[in-house]
C-alpha cells in the first residue's frame, strides 16, 4: 500500500505544481486573467463539465467509461422543456423529473453493462446515439424558451458574490471525495477497478457498485443539464455534444488510470482547473481557439508522460 | 421495481411527443410569416420603433482605435471565410479598427458562448456575431452590453434587445421568394422537392423554411414538399443526407433545396454521383466558388445568395458608426463605405440588399 500511496501523491503533486505554474505564466500574459471577476466567471463556465467529471472519476476508476454523458445531458435538457411546457407540470417538478430521467438513463447504461455483460465502451457508445436520437425525436428539434425569471438565478446569478453553480460544484466535490476516499463504497470502487475477479471473490458487490456508479453518472449529467438550461435560457436537443471528451480529458489529466484502480477527486479537480485556466488564459493572451486545443492536447500528453516516468514500478 | 420505473419513463417520453405541434414543413420555426406577392411587386417597408439593446455607459470611442472580435457560427467554412474577409477589408479601409475572427470549429452554441465570454473578459470594444441560437446567445450578449461593449450581429440574429443592430443580408421573405421561384421555374408547378438544412433550430434557416412554406402555399400551391433533413453545416452529413433523399424518393424527387452554403455543393455532388444531373434540380444558398464546377457543367442552373464579403464589410462599418455615435436608435439609414447608404428595416435591422442569383453567365466573375 505504501508505495502505491506514494504514486498517488506523485501525480497529484506534479499536477498541482503544473496548475500553479500555468496560473503564474498566464497571469503574467494578461492582467485580466487573475482577477476575481474572471476566475469566478471561469468557475461558472466549468460547473457543468466539473459536475459530470466527478462521477466520471468513479466510472473510470472501476475500469469502465461512460461516453453517453453528453447525450444524457441533451436528453435531460430537452425533458425540462417538455415536462414544463408540453406536459404542463410546475417548473420545479419538471426540473426534478428531468434530473431523475438522467438517472434513469444512467441506470439503463448500468443494466446493459452488468446484466448483459456488454463492455462499457460499446454500451455507452450505443446509448450515446440512442439518447441523442431520443432527445431529437421528443423535442422535434423545437427549442423551449420563456422560462420564469427565478429559473435563471440558478445558472446566471450569484449567491454571496460567488456563482450559484460554483457552490453546487463545491458541495459535490466535498461529497464525492468523502465517498470515494472514506467509505466502503469508495474502497469497493477501487477494488472493482484494480482486479474485478478478486473483488468478486472477496465478496464485494461488484454489479451493484457498477450499477450505482452509472446511475450516479446519469443523475449528475441530468443536474448539469438543468444548470446549463438555466445558464443559456433555452433548451436545444444538441446541447452537450462533445461534453464526454472534455470530461474524460479532465479526469484522465487528474491522474485517474484508464485501466481502473487509480484516481482521486482531488486530481480531477486539479485537472479541471488546469484545463479551464489554460482555456481562459490563452484566450486572454490572444491565442485563438485552435491554438488552445493544441496546447491542451500537449499538456495532457505531457502530464501523463511525466507521471508515468515518476511512477514506474516495474510493470511498464 | 426497476421494470416499473423503465416502463413509466418510456410511457412519459412517448406521451410527450404527440403534445408537440408540427409546423407546415419540418425545419421551419413557428414565428409569423409574411410572404411577398407572387409577381415582382416589392414588399411594403413598414416603420417600426427601435428595438435593439443599449450598452451601459460605453466609453467615448469617437475617432479612436477600437478592437473588434468577430465570432461567427463556426470557422473554417467558405461562407464565414468570406464574411471574415469582408470584415478585414473594412477594417483596413477604416484604418482605426483592428478586427480578429475567432470561433468554434463546429456550429455549437455552447462553445460560441464561451468564446464570446472570454472576449468580454479580455475587454474588446466591439463584438460582431452570427448566432448559432438566437435565445441561447442572448444572455452573454446582454452581459457584453452591460460592460459597455458595442454589439452588432450579422447573418444570424439574436433576440433584438441583446444587440444594438443586426445586418440582415436579405429579407427572409425575399430569399424564400427567390428560392421557390427558381425551383418552380426548373421543376414545374407540380414538382416535388426535399430540403437539406443545418439544424431545425438554426435561426435563419428556420425562418427561410417557414417563409418558403408560406410563399409556396400562396403562389405555388401544387408543388409538393417531401422531407427536410438536418446536416449541421457539415460536408459529409449533407452529402449523406442528399444521397439518402435521392435513394428514398427515386423518380419522385425532382428538386433539392440546399439551405446552407455547405449543403448546396454537397447536394450537387450527390446528384452528380447518382448520375441524376438534369433529372434532379439543385437550388440553394452557396458561395460561387463551391458551385462553379456544377454550374459550368450544367448540373445546377441557379445559385441564390447575397455577397457575404459585403455582409462582413457592412457589419464592420455599422459597428464603427455605432462606436462613433453617428448611428443612433431611430436612424433610417447608415453609410457603409463602398456599399453606399443601407436602409434600416424592422426597427433595428439593416438591410444589405436584394438577393443575388448566380447563373452560368455570371458565376465566373466571382471569387469567393
Image (cartoon, helix red, strand yellow):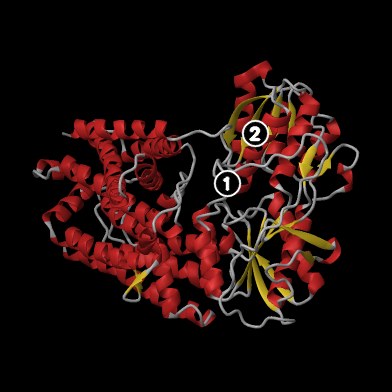
Residue B332: percent from left, percent from top: 75, 64
The residue depicted at 20 percent of the width and 45 percent of the height is A212
Which quadrant of the view contains residue B102?
A: bottom right
Give above or below for A184 relative to A139: below
Query: Residue lying furthest top in this view?
Result: B251
Extreme residue in the right direction: B361
Q: Residue under label 1, please give it.
A: B202
Question: SS at mark 1?
Answer: loop
The picture quadrant where one finds residue A228 is bottom left
Query: Is disc 2 on the same chain as disc 1?
Result: yes
Tally of numbered discs: 2
Residue B329 in sight: yes
Q: Callout 2: few (<14), some (14-19), or many (20+) C-alpha neighbours within 10 Å? A: many
Q: Between residue A156 and residue B367, name the one nearer to us.
A: A156
Residue count near mark 1 (Cα–Cα under 10 Å), binned few <14, some 14–19, many ≥20: many
Label 2, secondary structure: give it: helix
Residue at mark 1 to residue at mark 2: CA–CA distance: 17 Å
Counting from the top left corner in percent of width and height, residue B295 is at 82, 35
The answer to the question of whether label 1 and label 2 lie on touching residues, with beta carbons closer than 8 A, is: no
The image shows residue A215, relative to residue B127, as above or below, that is above
Residue beneath label 2, please? B213
- Does any portion of residue B233 appear in the rendered image? no
Residue A290 drawn at (x, y percent):
58, 60
Q: Residue A139 carries which label?
A: none
Disc 1: host chain: B
Protein chain holding label 2: B
Q: Nearer the viewer, mark 1 or mark 2?
A: 2
Earlier residue among tags 1 and 2: 1
Q: In this view, does A33 lie to the left or right of A213?
A: right
Amino acid at each position: 500500500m505504501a508505495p502505491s500511496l506514494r504514486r498517488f501523491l506523485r501525480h497529484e503533486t506534479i499536477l498541482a505544481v503544473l496548475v500553479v505554474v500555468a496560473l503564474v505564466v498566464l497571469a503574467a500574459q494578461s492582467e485580466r486573467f487573475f482577477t476575481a471577476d474572471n476566475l469566478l466567471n471561469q468557475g461558472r463556465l466549468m460547473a457543468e463539465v466539473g459536475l459530470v467529471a466527478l462521477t466520471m472519476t468513479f466510472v473510470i476508476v472501476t475500469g469502465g467509461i461512460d461516453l453517453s454523458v453528453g447525450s444524457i445531458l441533451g436528453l435531460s435538457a430537452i425533458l425540462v422543456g417538455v415536462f414544463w411546457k408540453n406536459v404542463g407540470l410546475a417548473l420545479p417538478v419538471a426540473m426534478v423529473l428531468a434530473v431523475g430521467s438522467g438517472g434513469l438513463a444512467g441506470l439503463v447504461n448500468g443494466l446493459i453493462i452488468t446484466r448483459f455483460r456488454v463492455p462499457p465502451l460499446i454500451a455507452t457508445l450505443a446509448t450515446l446515439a440512442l439518447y441523442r436520437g431520443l432527445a431529437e425525436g421528443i423535442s422535434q428539434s423545437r427549442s423551449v424558451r420563456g422560462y420564469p425569471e427565478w429559473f435563471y438565478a440558478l445558472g446566471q446569478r450569484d449567491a454571496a458574490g460567488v456563482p450559484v453553480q460554483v457552490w453546487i460544484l463545491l458541495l459535490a466535490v466535498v461529497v464525492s471525495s468523502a465517498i470515494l476516499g472514506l467509505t466502503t463504497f469508495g474502497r469497493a470502487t477501487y477494488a472493482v477497478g484494480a482486479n474485478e475477479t478478486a473483488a468478486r471473490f472477496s465478496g464485494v458487490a461488484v454489479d451493484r457498485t457498477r450499477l450505482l456508479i452509472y446511475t450516479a453518472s446519469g443523475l449528475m449529467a441530468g443536474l448539469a443539464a438543468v444548470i446549463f438550461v438555466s445558464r443559456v435560457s433555452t433548451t436545444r436537443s444538441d446541447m452537450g455534444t462533445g461534453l464526454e471528451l472534455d470530461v474524460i480529458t479532465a479526469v484522465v489529466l487528474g491522474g485517474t488510470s484508464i485501466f481502473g484502480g487509480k484516481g482521486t477527486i482531488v486530481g480531477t479537480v486539479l485537472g479541471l482547473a488546469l484545463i479551464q485556466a489554460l482555456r481562459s488564459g490563452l484566450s486572454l493572451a490572444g491565442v485563438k481557439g485552435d491554438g488552445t486545443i493544441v496546447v491542451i492536447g500537449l499538456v495532457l500528453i505531457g502530464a501523463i508522460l511525466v507521471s508515468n516516468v515518476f511512477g514506474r514500478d516495474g510493470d511498464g | 421495481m426497476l421494470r416499473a420505473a423503465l416502463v413509466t419513463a418510456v410511457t412519459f417520453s412517448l406521451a410527450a411527443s404527440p403534445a408537440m405541434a408540427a409546423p407546415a414543413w419540418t425545419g421551419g420555426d413557428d414565428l409569423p410569416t409574411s410572404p411577398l406577392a407572387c409577381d415582382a411587386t416589392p414588399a411594403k417597408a413598414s416603420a417600426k420603433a427601435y428595438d435593439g439593446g443599449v450598452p451601459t455607459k460605453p466609453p467615448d470611442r469617437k475617432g479612436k482605435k477600437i478592437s473588434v472580435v468577430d465570432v461567427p457560427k463556426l470557422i473554417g467554412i467558405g461562407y464565414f471565410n468570406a464574411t471574415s474577409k469582408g470584415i478585414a477589408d473594412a477594417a483596413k479601409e477604416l484604418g482605426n479598427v483592428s478586427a480578429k475572427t475567432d470561433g468554434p470549429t463546429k456550429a455549437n452554441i455552447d462553445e460560441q458562448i464561451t468564446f464570446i465570454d472570454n472576449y468580454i473578459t479580455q475587454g474588446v470594444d466591439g463584438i460582431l456575431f452570427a448566432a448559432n441560437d438566437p435565445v441561447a446567445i442572448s444572455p452573454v450578449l446582454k452581459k457584453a452590453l452591460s460592460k459597455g461593449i458595442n454589439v452588432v450581429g450579422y447573418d444570424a440574429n439574436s433576440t433584438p434587445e441583446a444587440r444594438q443592430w443586426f445586418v440582415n443580408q436579405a429579407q427572409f421573405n425575399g430569399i424564400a421568394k427567390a428560392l421557390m421561384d427558381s425551383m418552380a421555374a426548373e421543376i414545374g408547378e407540380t414538382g416535388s422537392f426535399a430540403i437539406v438544412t443545418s439544424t431545425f433550430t438554426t435561426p435563419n434557416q428556420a425562418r427561410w423554411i417557414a417563409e418558403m412554406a408560406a410563399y409556396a402555399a400562396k403562389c405555388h400551391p401544387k408543388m409538393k414538399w417531401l422531407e427536410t433533413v438536418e446536416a449541421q453545416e457539415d460536408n459529409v452529413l449533407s452529402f449523406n443526407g442528399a444521397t439518402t433523399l435521392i435513394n428514398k424518393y427515386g423518380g419522385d424527387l425532382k428538386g433539392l433545396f440546399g439551405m446552407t452554403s455547405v449543403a448546396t455543393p454537397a447536394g450537387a455532388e450527390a446528384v452528380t454521383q447518382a448520375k441524376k444531373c438534369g433529372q434532379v434540380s439543385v437550388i440553394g444558398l452557396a458561395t460561387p466558388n463551391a458551385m462553379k464546377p456544377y454550374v459550368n457543367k450544367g448540373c445546377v442552373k441557379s445559385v441564390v445568395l447575397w455577397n457575404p464579403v459585403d455582409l462582413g464589410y457592412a457589419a464592420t462599418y455599422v459597428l464603427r458608426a455605432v462606436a462613433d455615435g453617428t448611428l443612433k436608435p431611430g436612424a433610417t439609414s447608415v453609410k457603409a463605405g463602398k456599399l453606399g447608404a443601407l436602409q434600416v428595416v424592422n426597427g433595428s435591422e439593416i438591410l444589405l440588399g436584394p438577393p443575388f442569383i448566380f447563373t452560368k453567365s455570371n458565376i465566373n466573375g466571382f471569387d469567393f
